[in-house]
Image (cartoon, rainbow, N blue to C red):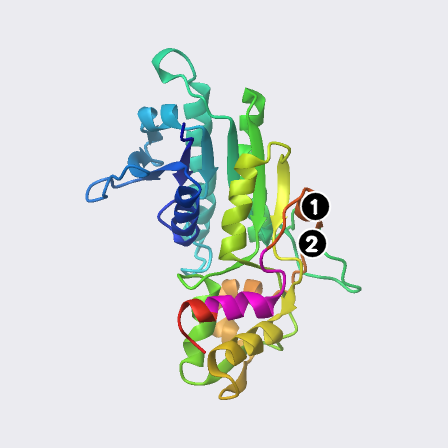
Amino acid sequence: MKQTVLITGGTGMVGKALTRALVKKGYKVIILTRNVRGKEQQEQVQYAAWDVSKQQMDRHALQEADYIIHLAGAGVVEKKWTAAYKKEIQDSRTESSRLIIDSLKNNSGSYRNKVKAVISASAIGWYGADTEPVKPFTENDAADNSFLGHTCKLWEESIEPVTTMGKRLVKFRIGIVLSNEGGALVEFKKPLRFGVAGILGNGKQMVSWIHIDDLCNLFIAGIENESLSGSYNAVAPNPVSNKALTLTLAKAMKGKFYIPMPVPAFVLKIMMGQRSIEVLKSTTVSSKKIQDAGFAFGFKNIEAALQDLSAATGQR
């Protein structure tokens, strides 16, 4: 019998890739969306309505679910960090968690659910900047006293009540996701179309990254490995500097035909405002806990990850 996974945020970059990975493994997927109209309902991928602002969710979809994967949340770097957008970033995460919690609590009669576990996204924004000497951040480190640190803390706390219902909770603190379908890698590629490798700031800041395929497999491990519980860093074992990432990507795409060009920190601050703090911040994050739990990364090194992603698009 097929098991069913209910996904919030399923129409985003990670959600789309994860849906494909789940279907490939034989799961049925139900994606919660604000607008069901026009969505093609298939045997293995279906859509159901929810509205976080009204705190409403399709109860039938919840009844069908064996697992919930919670990805929903407004993009962190897409828009300028105004006070209003900062509130949206936080509320979109905590209020969606509240809807999940309240829906699961109403677990009687015709509303009874069979959800075994909730696998929730979080982010390495939980951590602050590296200090000297560099000691990789682990899951035991406290949340940073910054906007993103506080946001991640609220995010994780908002989904925590599922543990009081006897349901297993796994939280993945996700690093920079490398994918051809969006996110940071697409931005890194833009100047390379013109043969320019844009190195951000001094390029020394460490980037804790993960290949999209490994991230999808981590979420599936969160479902299938019942020993997983609590917080885990979703980052590859070998973080790299921004300069190394950029030059490795340039080599994968252009061979020798590119020009390294630093983008000064002050320019990034003018262009991005407060968001520039994150792209200039060095954050070295450990993957030891999830590896010790038995997870094997398919892409441990940036060279293999970028070669794979470049090959997938037919780029040199």
Q: Is residue 112 magenta?
A: no
Q: Residue furthest top?
A: 109
Image coords of residue 167 (percent x, y): 55, 25
Number of other residues with Cα within 10 Å of mark 2, as a class: few under 14, some 14 to 19, many 20 or more: many
Quadrant of residue 210 in the image? bottom right
Nearer-the-camera pick, 137 or 148: 137
Report helix, strand or loop for mark 1. helix
Image coords of residue 32 (percent x, y): 34, 38
Nearer-the-camera pick, 199 or 1: 1
Quadrant of residue 63 in the image? top left
Q: Residue at x 76, y 62 (%)?
A: 134
Nearer-the-camera pick, 129 or 255: 255
Q: Main secondary structure of the magenta part?
A: helix
Q: Are marks 1 and 2 in contact (CB under 8 Å)?
A: yes
Horizontal arrangement in the rendering, residue 19 relative to residue 33 (left or right): right
Q: Residue furthest left?
A: 38
Report helix, strand or loop for mark 2. loop
| Disc 2 residue type (three-letter) | Ser
Q: Residue at x 48, y 64 (%)?
A: 184
